[in-house]
Image (cartoon, rainbow, N blue to C red):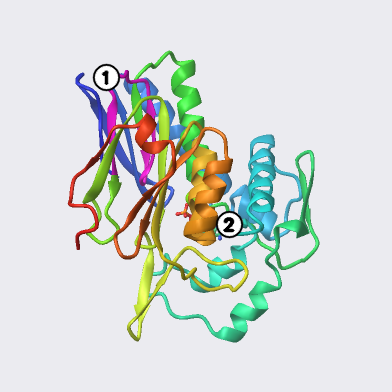
Amino acid sequence: MLCVGCGEQAYTRQGFLLDTVVRITLYDQDDETMDACFALIAECEAALSRTDPESELAQLNARLIDTVSDETAELIADALAIAALTDGAFDPTVGRLCDLWNFSAVSPTLPDAGEIADALVSVGYDGVHLDGSRVWFDNSQTMLDLGAIAKGEIADRVCVLLRERGVERAIINLGGNVVVLGGTEEDPYRVGVQDPASPTGNSLLSLAVTDATVVTSGIYNRGFTVDGQYYHHILDPHTGYPVENTLASVTIIGPSSRQADALSTACMVLGETDAMALIEATEGVDAILITRLGEVLFSAGVKEKYDVQFLREEGSD
Ligand code: AMP
Ligand code: MG
């Protein structure tokens, strides 16, 4: 997702964290603040990573611990609440399914149908319970995967850190999960929305935003092709397979990146009609849905609140 800041001199640092490109832009050359942002992201990754066996989440999934930090407990509680709100379209208990599909592998392979059926038994947000920061599971095989909400959460935490340090303007971009801090009506940020049909970095449209988050989930982010069939990383927790509907991507614009991250994934699973209904019923958030045919659908507030510019002809190939 492209993000163009306001007129002032920008100071950007980029790194590879959270299995993606992390880019932070400040408008002061403040290395100490930049260091603090990257240290915070590394600390969050150390707690929430699925691949690092030392992480709090991995240890919880291995049942080596049953009590997590207050921040992680709060994130799990919110993930479970969004799962309930979306009838399990978003479901953080897809861990075992994600392991089977292993979209991050160098050469992913199609999982066996029997293994998927087996893993599906461990999926179900209502089998996870919290009491304060203690977590327990009904099914010993259930594993949490917070990949659909963690980047948003971490972006929000970086934003808090920046505000505490008195930073008034900044762009936090965690692999396309964008938060812009500051900006004014006269001098907003322009955030690009990826064209799902084009290589990464090609925006279909851009919108002007101030003090907001813009988060996209798309089928193009991660996936592989076997025998002409494309398999992408957003799974339908009810079937165990990549979700098949008309949507190619969902972009959420709102105040909380954690919420926007979870909602963008949920909307991908819900499909056009239910996604739009959910967004219209959720206070303060808007959505841009792009279909596999290149059609662009806006929730009611988008054109009212944001200046949208098409960078390519709408609906073109
Ligand atoms: P996102 O890119 O935010 O849509 O998140 C996708 C990631 O979330 C995947 O790579 C999985 O780790 C995880 N995931 C996949 N499907 C779901 C789902 N239906 N609910 C919750 N997390 C999911
Ligand atoms: Mg998400």
The amino acid beneath tag 1 is Gln
At 32% from the left and 42% from the top, the residue drawn is: 15
Does the residue at mark 1 contact the one at mark 2 (Cβ under 8 Å)? no
Residue 68 versus residue 255 in the image, above or below: below
Residue drawn at point x = 37 percent, y = 32 percent: 304
Q: Secondary structure at mark 1?
A: loop
In the rendered image, residue 183 lying in the magenta stretch gets the answer: yes
How much space separates mark 1 and mark 2, taking CA atoms?
A: 36 Å
Question: In the rendered view, does 180 fall on the left or right side of 280?
Answer: left
Image height check: is 312 above or below 244? above
Please name the residue shown 35% across and 36% down the image. 303
Q: Along the horizontal axis of the image, is 210 left or right of 238?
A: left
Residue receiving disc 2: 53
Please tell me in which quadrant of the rendered image residue 186 appears: top left
Residue found farthest to the top:
166
Asked whether residue 148 appears in the rendered view, the answer is no
Query: In terms of sequence position, does the residue under pointer 1 or pointer 2 come before the other?
Result: 1
Res 146 visible: yes
Quick check: 114 left or right of 176?
right
Specify start and end residues of the magenta stretch as a single range: 172-192
Q: Residue 171, position in %: x, y?
A: 34, 30
Residue carrying label 1: 29
Q: Nearer the viewer, residue 268 or 73?
A: 268
In the image, residue 220 lies at what x, y percent? Answer: 34, 62
Amino acid under disc 2:
Pro
| Relative to 16, residue 207 above or below | above
Characterize the local packing of mark 1: few (<14), some (14-19) or many (20 or more) Cα atoms within 10 angstroms: few
Question: What residue do we see at 69% from left, 35% from top?
Answer: 70
Check mark 1 vs ligand 1: CB closer than 8 Å? yes or no: no
x then y, percent, for residue 162: 44, 22
State the mark number for residue 218.
none
Secondary structure beneath dot 2 equals: loop
